Image (spheres, coloured by chain):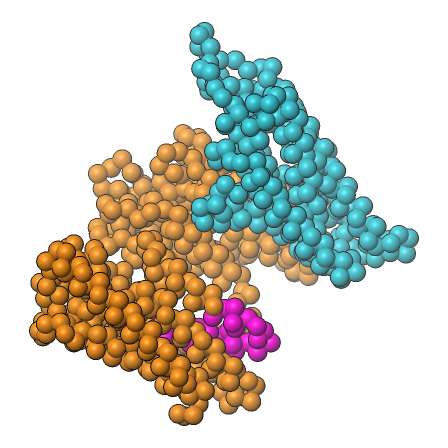
Chain colours: A orange, B cyan
Amino acid sequence: MIGAWRRTLSPLQLAVFVSGVAFFALYTRHSLRLYAASVGGDFTYWDVVLETGGSAYLLSFWIVPVATWCALRQMQTGARPENMVRYATRTDWAFAQAVRGLPWISALAVSAVLVALVAGVGFPFVWGWSPASFDETVLQQFPALMATLPIPLVSVLLLCLALAATLAVFTVAVAVVAARLEHPRLVAVWAVALALWGSISFRADGAVLRLLSPSTYALPWVASVSLPLGPGGGVMILLVGGALVFAAARWMELRGARLVLRSSMLVAVGAGAAVLAGLAMAHPAADSSSEWDLVLLLQGVAPEGASLLDYLGVVILALLPALVVHRELVAALSGRRYAEMIRMASPAGWYLRRLGAAARFVIGYSLALGLWAALLVGLRSRTGRVGDAFVLAGAWAGTLALQVFVVVVMLSLGTMLARRVEGGAYAIAVVAVLAWPLGELSRWSPAGQASLLRLADVTSVTPALVLPLPALVLLAWLALLIPVTASLFNRTRGEIH
Amino acid sequence: MVVAALLILVVPPVSGYVSLPAYAFSHWTAYFTVMIDAVALIFPLLITLITQPRLLDEWSNSYALATRQRVEPARYFGARVAASAILAAVVFLVLTIVCFAVARWTYSYPSPEGPPGVLVETRYQFSQLWAVSPALYLVVYCLWVALVSGTVAAVCTLITAVVGNKFVALAAPFVLWSLTDFGLAVLDLAALSLPPFRFHIKQQPIWTEFAGWALILIVLGALYLYVHRRDYQTAGIVRT
């Protein structure tokens, strides 16, 4: 065991790492002394320790790069077929790398904290926090001094644990790619990209970017301001999320992950979730309330008027699942299922049964996106009534389901009217044009009602007021379009060219 | 195809002319952008609809296999790509000229004191050329629209050649176009959004127009290579 980890991190390399941390500690001591002299502050031992060990700069520019090197060395020796055959799945092997890397991970985490503990020697020692730790000016200059827990010693222990847990997850992330033995060069590219992301993202302001930054999980003081679960939230999320991801990845791998990943639902939900995350990145979080934050996220129209970004977001969210459903319909009408429809003697009945199956798909898609939207808003806004945001997200998800269903029927209607495949493409053009905000006309349009701005009364004092009009408009369109399309199916016997 | 092309040529100028009384355009070029707005929203879909249906019919069975006896596959496929590109380029060139002409000759301002003075050269993509000569801007922009339309039509043809499901082949260019523009906007790179109808963003340096076109060319090259390596017998060309 010791021999194995020495190949990953030799004593000389550990000495170089410790020297780097020590150099940073000396610089931090010097900066704190200068600052204390200029403002008359009174820093204690723990302030220096946590400012040194909990520095995002030290983590991003020294600890993570060294960890990248160690992880790559570990993969170089471990990612071989003769080692991997001893594990039931690639997932098992990838997660086992966190345990296998524990010696060097703990060496890095513990030595960084030990050097920080030594760096504090010479400053006045008290068991509690000093008043300077809570000073607003100091916190702006040295945010690591933030008192994340009532006892400094517990803060240091938590820091050590969070560092080790983050490095372990980092190792697993590298191992996931290393498990694909057919692309050996990809591992180095991926590991370096992760390290670069760590050094770029720790200064990010956006809530979503901070959620994806390694420093949020490695440094308890960052976790206390970026995550809703307090200073220990980072470690909790890593442990619980890691366990869930492990269980899900193993389940998928054992039951044909590739098949599952190609399934229509996952593709549609994945694309929709990516679009929502993109909208969340593009829209700054609202300060006022979580309901307003949700309206901003899913509005479909920018506050200053029509915006291409919001328009495209709403169109893609409604169109993609409809395209997935319609693709299946076209394939069925062009293939052997056509004969099945003719045998049933009722093309309309066949079509309605297919719509029933599509409804389950659409409802699942909308529920998943509604939950994702509520989660995004919950993570973004730390003020306001989250319950109202959930109600609004639920109403939006319901309207989105109706909207997708209307688009599905419009595509079928276009196809049946033209009796050609390109009829569906004409219907897409109609949907895309009608989704553009056209003022009063848009209130009655069959497309674009999934915009939350049409669902919520933003002029109201409480923006969570949900208006039923968009849902009613969509239901009316459904009541009109479904019988027309079904009768066209009967009339044309579902023949398309 | 003829009906689709005629609709594309007639609807934008007519819809612009009908909506003219509802607006107070400061210049006739602003009137032109309103005419072309709906076209800009579904630009790749319109190109697909005028160029691909005939190809979908031609490639709906093993017809392409039979042509290999008479003509070299690369030449046959190249001719199909070129025909699509030329057709789209001509239709959109004529559309742009017609819209410019209608906007120029039917423009009016509702107030008797006339519109406020505007600097067209700071408003739109390529309109920096207006400062040199208004005619130069109009000619260059019309040719640019034709060039980009031709390139997009070539990409649409290659997508039709690659994708087995006919409906997906028709919808894919529009979906990919929308996703690309959406992704660029999210990443705060709207300045590099796809040409040629970029009226939704403020004027950018002229080179940014070519960035989007270069991306389309890269996709075109990659798809062409894919089809060539499969000896022109991809899922969309040969349907058995």
Measuring 56% from the left and 89% from the top, which residue is drawn there?
A: A82
Residue occupying the far right of the picture: B70
Residue closer to the observer: A418 or A160: A160
Q: Is residue B25 left or right of A243 when viewed as pictured?
A: right
Residue closer to the observer: A445 or B32: B32
Q: Is residue A460 visible?
A: yes
Measuring 64% from the left and 57% from the top, which residue is drawn there?
A: A332
Q: Is residue A1 left or right of A407 when viewed as pictured?
A: left
Provide the residue span drawn in magenta: A166-191
Measuring 83% from the left and 50% from the top, which residue is drawn there?
A: B76
Q: Is residue A282 left or right of A461 when viewed as pictured?
A: right
Magenta stretch: helix, strand or loop mostly: helix
Residue closer to the observer: A460 or A104: A104
Q: Which x, y percent locates residue A297? A: 36, 47
**Image position of A261 with respect to B200: above or below:** below
**Image position of A83 with respect to A161: above or below:** below
Q: Quadrant of residue B222?
A: bottom right
Residue closer to the observer: A25 or B7: A25
Q: Which x, y percent locates residue A308? A: 46, 39
In reply to whether residue A48 is colored magenta, the answer given is: no
Q: Which quadrant of the rendered structure holds the N terminus of chain B?
A: top right
Measuring 50% from the left and 68% from the top, which residue is drawn there?
A: A190
Q: Which x, y percent locates residue A234? A: 29, 69
Q: Which x, y percent locates residue B231? A: 79, 60
- The number of numbered discs placed on residues in the rendered structure image is 0
**Image position of A187 with respect to B122: above or below:** below
Q: Which quadrant of the rendered structure holds the C terminus of chain B?
A: bottom right
Residue occupying the far top of the picture: B112
Q: Is residue B35 visible?
A: no
